[in-house]
Image (cartoon, rainbow, N blue to C red):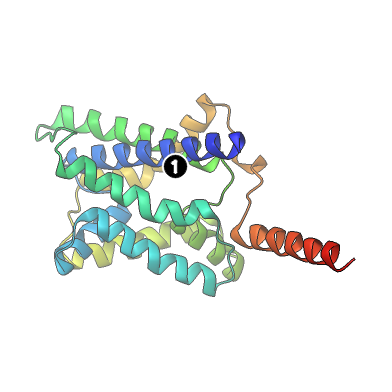
Amino acid sequence: MKKIVLALLKLFAGYFVCAIGIVMTINANLGLAPWDVFHQGLSNVTGITIGRAHILAGVSIIILDSIFGEKIGWGTVLNMLFIGIFIDFLMLNDLIPIFNKLLPSLIMMLLGMLILGFGCYLYISVGWGSGPRDGLMIALVKRTNKSVRFIKNTQEIIAVTIGYLLGGHVGIGTFIMAILGGYFMQFAFKITKFDVSKVQHRFIDDDIKFIKGKLISKKSDVQE
């Protein structure tokens, strides 16, 4: 139980840190990250908050992940819900300042990317499943046999294009984040000495099988 509680604390700390990083890149006002362009466009069209648009997109992507046969973890579901909730909490309460001058905006955006990298380290290292968008990327890589870079870039180009057509804010920051986002995440992982390839994820179907096994075992004990 103690292990589960500590894992949950680390998981939610990661989601909150991710939300801080995302809101910092939004409030830097230099253009949104590729997926956030899509979320803002969805927000403009539907009238919902960016956080709720993040959740709505996450639900749709998790459905696609399942269709493509990618396993879903509890962390995937919680990621979908709580990063969006934390984004709304930070933005609706004006807890992170908005910058309009180039130098402070650029510094804020770069710091936001680094903080987002640390947030990803926190939640991924728990091993309860990747985020919905990363899960879709993995599923498409398996299906198409294309490189991770090609699939990731394709996803982000599609997200930016649709988001822009829906009124999302595209700027120089969008291109900077598209190019440097992976490097900042890699730098955060290097600082924390985190090797993502060594993470053993536990998925929802693993827990279902475990519970079924326990129930069958108890039923057998009763019959004996």
Q: Residue at left 79%, top 66%?
A: 219
Q: Residue furthest left?
A: 100
Q: Residues within 10 Å of mark 1 (few under 14, many from 20)?
A: some
Q: Residue at x 47, y 53 (%)?
A: 131
- Quadrant in the rendering for residue 43: bottom left
Q: Quadrant of residue 16?
A: top left
Farthest top residue in view: 191
Q: Viewed as shown, does residue 181 lie left or right of 22?
A: right
Quadrant position of the N terminus in the picture:
top right
| Along the line of sight, the residue nearer the viewer: 189 or 6 | 6
Residue nearest the observer in this picture, 35 or 4: 4
In the picture, the quarter occupied by the C terminus is: bottom right
The residue closer to the viewer here, 219 or 117, is 219
Give the percent coordinates (x, y) of residue 14.
Answer: 43, 38
Left or right side of 95 for 126: right
| Farthest bottom residue in view | 67
The three-letter amino acid code for the residue at tag 1 is Gly
| Left or right of 216, for residue 122 | left
Q: Secondary structure at mark 1?
A: helix
Which residue is rendered at x = 22% and y = 65% of the image?
42
Q: Is residue 98 above or below residue 62?
A: above
Is residue 25 at all visible to an observer of this figure?
yes
Q: Position of residue 150 (x, y in %)?
A: 49, 59
Q: Quadrant of residue 138?
A: bottom right
Position of 217 relative to 99 (above/below)? below
Residue 195 visible within the image: no
- x and y percent of residue 99 in the render? 12, 33
Disc 1 designates what residue? 182
Instruction: Tell me where residue 46 appears, x and y as whole percent.
Output: 17, 68
